[in-house]
Image: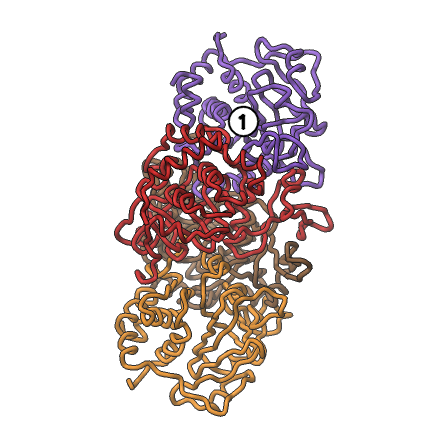
Chain colours: A red, B brown, C purple, D orange
Amino acid sequence: MLASAPPLLTVASLAQRIKAGAKVVLPPDYSGCAMAVVAELMRAHVRDLHLVGAPVLGFQADQLIGAGCVARIESAAVTLGEHGLAPRFTAALKTGEIEMWDATCPAIHAGLQAAEKGVPFMPLRGLIGSDLLRVRPDWKVIDNPLAEDGRRDPIVILPAIRPDVALFHAAKADRHGNVWIGIRRELMLMAHASRSTFVTVEEIVDGNLLHDPALAAGTIPALYVTALAVASGGSAPIGLVDCYAPDQAALAAYASAARSDDGFARWLDHHLEKVPVSA
Amino acid sequence: MLASAPPLLTVASLAQRIKAGAKVVLPPDYSGCAMAVVAELMRAHVRDLHLVGAPVLGFQADQLIGAGCVARIESAAVTLGEHGLAPRFTAALKTGEIEMWDATCPAIHAGLQAAEKGVPFMPLRGLIGSDLLRVRPDWKVIDNPLAEDGRRDPIVILPAIRPDVALFHAAKADRHGNVWIGIRRELMLMAHASRSTFVTVEEIVDGNLLHDPALAAGTIPALYVTALAVASGGSAPIGLVDCYAPDQAALAAYASAARSDDGFARWLDHHLEKVPVSA
Amino acid sequence: MPTSLAPAEIMIAAIAPMLAGLDHVAVGAQSPIPGSAALLAQAKSGGRMRVSVLGSRDENPFTDGGRELFDCAGQGRIDAFFLSGGQIDGAANINLVGTGDIGAYPKSDQRFPGSFGSAYLYFVVPRVILFREEHTPRTLVEKVDFVSAPGTSAPEIYRPGGPHALVTSRCVFAFDRGAARFHLQSLHPGVTAAAVRAATGFAYDTPADVPTTPLPDAETLTLLRTDIARLVAATYPGFAARTWGL
Amino acid sequence: MPTSLAPAEIMIAAIAPMLAGLDHVAVGAQSPIPGSAALLAQAKSGGRMRVSVLGSRDENPFTDGGRELFDCAGQGRIDAFFLSGGQIDGAANINLVGTGDIGAYPKSDQRFPGSFGSAYLYFVVPRVILFREEHTPRTLVEKVDFVSAPGTSAPEIYRPGGPHALVTSRCVFAFDRGAARFHLQSLHPGVTAAAVRAATGFAYDTPADVPTTPLPDAETLTLLRTDIARLVAATYPGFAARTWGL
């Protein structure tokens, strides 16, 4: 089994596998964000990423937009939460630098589930009458083909969302490449739906997570994992539930600095200096 | 929180909540089967059940059919596994006593997921050209409405499966009504998809399963649980993974006895004598 | 009657009775006022009410990932939810995307974070309570610039849910789904109907006699400022600090 | 050349090379012969091949419930799977439902357990290997009475997968998807082409020269009877006892 385990890379070499133009699905700030990889993507000036929020985006997206790495955002929201609006996102929309595919949370979950199931679309209730349908020409209203005898029942169908890359951070993996995510099942959905999955973890543990009945229930099997890297503190300053809390001062400092182009540029220089080159 | 916990009943009074004519979804033999409740349903001669296999059925269905409790089976298969064909099922099909809705495993999963998501249908690949479509008029072939410019792309859509009752057995629950199922996520899907969920467990544990990050990942929250009962050994003789093994001798004895009407009748009398009235 | 109620406390006290008798109330992330109201209503129900608070360590019961809240609502298991809007209009349409001509989308004049789950939950949760502290012609507009989620739908549209009321820092509006229109239900202490009219960008009905928003009795206020405040602080520490100095 | 090969061992040895070079082979519950072949092929790959065995404690990697095998196949992550049939016909249609006139459904003459996942997996798994020990005109029929899953599909049908070969206790048939027809690929030791013809209810092509099914060399047979047999015994104890006395 070990021979088929995904490779254990450095953070930088893992980041190098994420190419310009890739469609990358990222978790929300409350799940596991691979901030160490985000730093490497910014350092490498990876271009034209299509970021998908599962289902919303925060600091990761704002930073990548500020660093010029993003061509398109597909998300139900982009926000720094209690730290306010996402300033680089807002600025980039104003300049027209990025394309925006506004969505609603369950539509993104449904699109990822369609990819997970290998079906081309998924139906979803709601949405009809929302201007989201005006700005999302890829979403379509059909009449429910199973509606009772001739009754009209309009319903929206959404295309599958199949990202090239799922990228996230988790507490632990084993040497077989199994990754423990606990109740953060959106990470499992991301891995199932995506062509490749890159994960950073706090630590590699001994044994096999799938052989422990309690841990297995919260584990993404190695067969979905393309490559791993150890990044201790890899989701700082956003934090990782049950491991470390958000660094609110650092997050506030970012939110403040990113309000201007210059402020962001200074923040980025300083940030990349602090993140060691791990090649 | 305790005030909103589902009630803890006896096995018999839990069984009494499952009414004649109910659409009841049951797990396969390798998941958790509430055999103690099945015995009470047979004792009470509950009639006209519509059993849904998630996605296949085994001993539970064969026994309930033999006891005259079943009007319809909806399943991808009915089998006693290494103990052979399901004899009461086979006999009831011959007499026309039960209606049969043959399916295929992923179609049942998809139908339950449609109910879980509150959508009226789910698409599924495959199936076209199968005679299952001839015997399942509720399944329909449509042209994928999102197919590229005019290309024909036939695809099957399946109606949601919304059972009245999900019934299963699990290793443990807590006093809040949360039920631990580990990797047996089909049980969670069943609970999400059904109007009511009845669960027997080996034991009630102290504390709150949702507050333990490892156990929470394999836990069905109490909000989906209608009522619980403690049934130690409640899935014998089929067995419960990590708790107790199948009693192959008892299973073989059933498979042999159930080959004839008389043999089944004797087995049932003897079986209900052994299962104490718990009311 | 207790004195010096915080504006947030008046809103909390106004929302809580709207939840009485419900089985399951869910609250989105970063919604401390609805969250406090739901926890208060739960305490008043003797714990019979289930309250699910997204982003809470102890009050979040979900174990199937980010989709579960929406699936749960789609199953009909959530009786009430809360939505806000950068703009809210008189037909209870809400805008969480941005202001300005939709033809210029996505170059909004002012960009909001995005629609979150509103375009779905507004349709399937029976009792959606709108809340917005800022009650000005800027937030309560005649017609939203972008409909994240519509207040009402044509009869053929599947819609078991929809708006119930709008609670602001000045008053409570009740919503009539048939008429697709708000009416002024109650005024917070010290607020006049004329002041509400001046601060509101949309048309609504005003009954001859508008009562004052019922304020919490002493017992309720004590409960709110002690047990509930402590629960709230676990999920919304900043809000609890600002409101109750916790 | 080892003597006294069990019939099951010949089938295992015939299937294993069909899996060479694949990344991920999945095996259904109660499929000991394909399961043994997959584990043998995995050992031959130096562990590079991933094998997922449903119902196995150690070789089953799935953590998302019963649906995951099918989702995983739909994602294109399963390269080979195995199906059998109560009836299999010359166009590789398989019948897992029952015999007799379909007009009498569900009152089959002989009822089989049901279609399981065949009506889906046959379409989406690139290399489906059919297996059936009993090679008689009763099992290998001209036309199945009920098509659980069709062997081929019209060009407009989404179908990345389909049948690759049919392995029985007598021989190996290869399947040509374009022609929708089997040809005799190899005969197990001691079996004649005429005997296969007499035992087969469907038409197929027979090349002028039909080789003997390659048998395992001594090293492979030792591997099968030691390490692989032990792995197999953990999931299929009855089969391992019958075949290897474990």
* D177 or B172, nearer to the observer: D177
Category of crowding for the residue at label 1, using alpha-carbon neighbours closer than 10 angstroms: few (below 14), some (14–19), many (at least 20): some
The residue positioned farthest toward the right in the image shown: A150
Residue in the foreground of this view, choosing between A82 and D153: A82
Residue drawn at 40 percent across, 50 percent down: B36
Q: Is residue B229 visible?
A: no
Q: Position of residue D100 (x, y in %)?
A: 59, 74
From the image, tell me which residue sits under label 1. C21
Q: Is residue C180 depicted above or below B245 in this figure?
A: above
Q: Position of residue C55 (x, y in %)?
A: 44, 33
Q: Is residue A143 above or below residue A255?
A: below
D42 vs B223, left or right, is: left
Of all chains, the one bearing label 1 is C
Q: Position of residue A118 (x, y in %)?
A: 53, 57
The residue lying at 43 percent from left, 58 percent from top is B268
What kind of residue is marked 1?
Gly
Among the 4 quarters of the image, the one containing residue B208: top left
User: Under tag 1, what secondary structure?
Assistant: loop
